[in-house]
Image (spheres, rainbow, N blue to C red):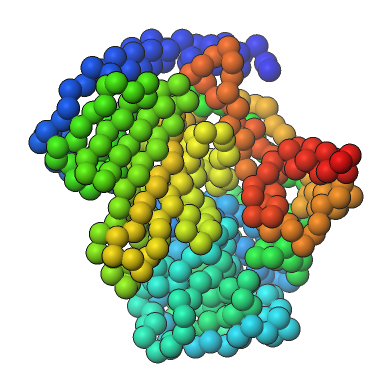
Amino acid sequence: MKTTEKIVRIGLIFLVMLSLYFSVSIWLSSSKKEQPLKNDPQLATTVVNERIDTDVFLPLQLIRMQDGKAEMNTSENLITNIQNEIKRSSFGKLTQTVAGDSEQFEKYLSMGQGFELLYEGPFLLKEYVSVYQLDLKLTDIDVDPIYFTCIQVDLTQNKIRFLDFDRKDIYEASIAMDNEKVLNLMNKVGVQYNPISEQQTVTSKHYYLSENQKMKKYSYILASQPVTKFRNAFFSNTENIQTNEDSKDLSYTSGSERLTADEKLGTIHFDGELDSRKAEDNIYSDSFNYIKKLGTNMGNIRYFDRTENEINYRTFVEGFPVFSENDKGQVRITIGNDKAEKSSVVIETSVDTIQVPIPSEDEVVLKSTENLLDQLIAAGADSEKINSVMIGYTWHKIEEITQVVDLTPEWYIRYENKWYPERELLEQLANLEVE
């Protein structure tokens, strides 16, 4: 680390340490002394700066296809601008063009000119249409709920397609959009792309980064949100909330709802219920009702992935997800049976968030996707168990500086439906060979 960088870091840390120290001290002392709450006017106050669903559910990657090349970009601004052009478009009738046919599915994976928007986890088409208020009719499709991970817009044929890589289904409609504006946005001077290899398949991903990737390291000032922020956001009944002062951990209860805060780890655990769920309700809209009320001070939280009953939202930095222990920078929401009269809700998150970046010139070079997969397979990984690969930032706690965290880029692999950093998965594979 350069001398000037050290001076800048120390200076910034010193300026915020006092304010952070007093904020945390006041929060901890007042939380323990808080009396049982009843008709607290703060609870009834409308949350300002609520999160917007179009930001939270924004696709994660953009693939530009032109002149026989495919290139990737993760810029949130570019993806937002392109998504806005889709929103302004008009659409024809949606039809299913491929149904579970791998050979036919493969034929749609390349285009002469167009783009794709990719999600990491499956997204519900009905929810996508609702979030972005698209004029796309779904009433003529008489099938089970449609999920997809890829939106494909063919600018030559003027078609929009929704691809489900797991089921090998494709739904297609005509689209009338401002092609010239879209091309100008994607080809604007200064917009950088990473070259990728085509027609490579890792379950839902069909592109590899074909070259080594140079990534910046980051350091961030750590901020701890007050527990009351989560209490106000998660409780449906904001009256007669009781505070438990006898437990080692701070807890709130109201009826069947309960929130517990582990003051040592900074974790938040909430148990609640959803009443009177309608047929059109789903895990995306249901979970977003909690996410939006956390406000905008929790970092850039976006939809990342989901399993059947659990949906995960992560903090993103420069278009890449942050991975950490103890749910720091993450919100995990599990919703029970959606057909029951009352569905259980469990939320796991942390009071710790990253807010202020500290300048750094350090960089890390990550190997290409192909080299990564070759190394994993050579170490004993089963290629059939590799669900996905993605670059992410790892949250590292700095022992000597408690209010600063380092974010280091590295490869993450979803292996047997669980995310591992490259180093950890390689270590686990080596241990399996020894056994």
| Quadrant containing the C terminus in the rendered view | top right
The residue at the point 23 percent across, 48 percent down is 236
Q: How many marks?
A: 0
Q: Position of residue 297 (x, y in %)?
A: 36, 35
Q: Visible in this render: residue 85?
A: no
Percent of width and height locating residue 86: 44, 70
Q: Quadrant of residue 294?
A: top left
Left or right: 373 as drawn, with respect to 244: right
On screen, 208 above or below 177? above
Q: Which residue appears farthest toward the front when viewing the image?
A: 246
Q: How far across and down, in percent of the image, does residue 206 sit?
A: 70, 66
Please tell me which residue is depicted at 19% across the width and 45% down the height of the picture: 237
Q: Is residue 16 visible?
A: yes
Residue at 69%, 65% in the rendered image = 203
Indicate whether 397 appears above or below 184: above
x%, y% of residue 238?
17, 41
Give whichever of 382, 389 is nearer the camera: 382
Quarter of the figure with the N terminus = top right
In percent of the image, x 54 and y 70: which residue is there? 148
Q: Quadrant of residue 395?
A: top right
Q: Quadrant of residue 157?
A: bottom right
Front in this rendered view, residue 416 or 90: 416
